[in-house]
Amino acid sequence: MVGLFSEFAILKKVRRTGWTWRNVPDPESIADHCYRVNLIAMMLCDALNRSVKNKNERFDAEKVMRMATLHEIAECRIGDIPYPAQKYIGSGVKTMAETKAVRDMLEGFGNGYVELWEEFENAASREGKLVKAADKFEMLLQALEYEKAGVKTLSDFWENEDTLKQIGFTPELKKLADHLVGVRKKLNR
């Protein structure tokens, strides 16, 4: 276990490649991103659960938090492969590599870690979709913060319709995504 725990430190050291490629000065680390995704996922889960009348439609908060915690674990082994690179390596290759890395890292630990990560990766449940939404929302929020600080090279983050669809899989989350887009439009006037 200690070896794996030490390996997690890589997430604190590796900068998010998408920001590095776009000349963002002192970009966040993968761990920085993961921590805020955890906070966002937790709070969105709680807010959505408060608005649900039917208890069967509630999100499993523990599952959401576990998925959010694990969501970038593969990057300990394969690094942060940014979206533009997938055009050349193929998203299937990236997914295969991440899946193999996660299985190699976590298979012997039980507790369903591998299955939870795969459920997130495939957005195979409401909880997986919520964590995907939190992941993408955090990315756009970070992009907006960098743009407020003067970075002018991030417009492609906002032009990816899949990102906005993943965030807006519920009406409440769509409102959040639309709000973020609106704030950015005001910033760029």
Image: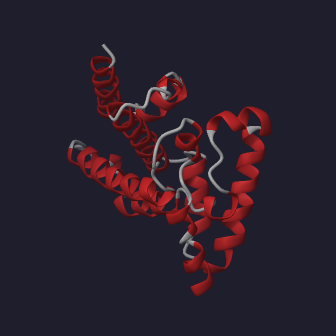
Name the residue rendered at 46%, 62% in the picture. 69
Name the residue rendered at 48%, 24% in the picture. 155
* Residue 170 visible in the displayed image: no
Depth check: give the residue in front, 82 or 102. Answer: 82
Q: How many marks?
A: 0
* On screen, residue 132 above or below 101: above
Q: Quadrant of the C terminus?
A: top left
* Residue 93 visible in the displayed image: yes
The picture places residue 75, in percent across and down from the top left corner, at 62, 58
The picture places residue 32, in percent across and down from the top left corner, at 42, 57
Where residue 108 sits, quadrant-wise, is bottom right
The residue lying furthest to the top in this view is 189
Give the colour scheme of this rendering: secondary structure
* On screen, residue 180 above or below 139: above
Is 160 left, or right, of 137 in this rendering?
Answer: right
The picture places residue 115, in percent across and down from the top left corner, at 60, 62
Is 47 left, or right, of 168 in this rendering?
Answer: left
* On screen, residue 142 above or below 117: above
Where residue 103 sits, quadrant-wise, is bottom right
Q: Quadrant of the N terminus?
A: bottom right
Name the residue rendered at 40%, 45% in the picture. 134
Name the residue rendered at 67%, 72% in the picture. 105
Is 43 left, or right, of 25 in this rendering?
Answer: left
The residue lying furthest to the bottom in this view is 2
Depth check: give the residue in front, 42 or 139. Answer: 139
The picture places residue 127, in percent across and down from the top left corner, at 44, 50
Where residue 173 sits, quadrant-wise, is top left
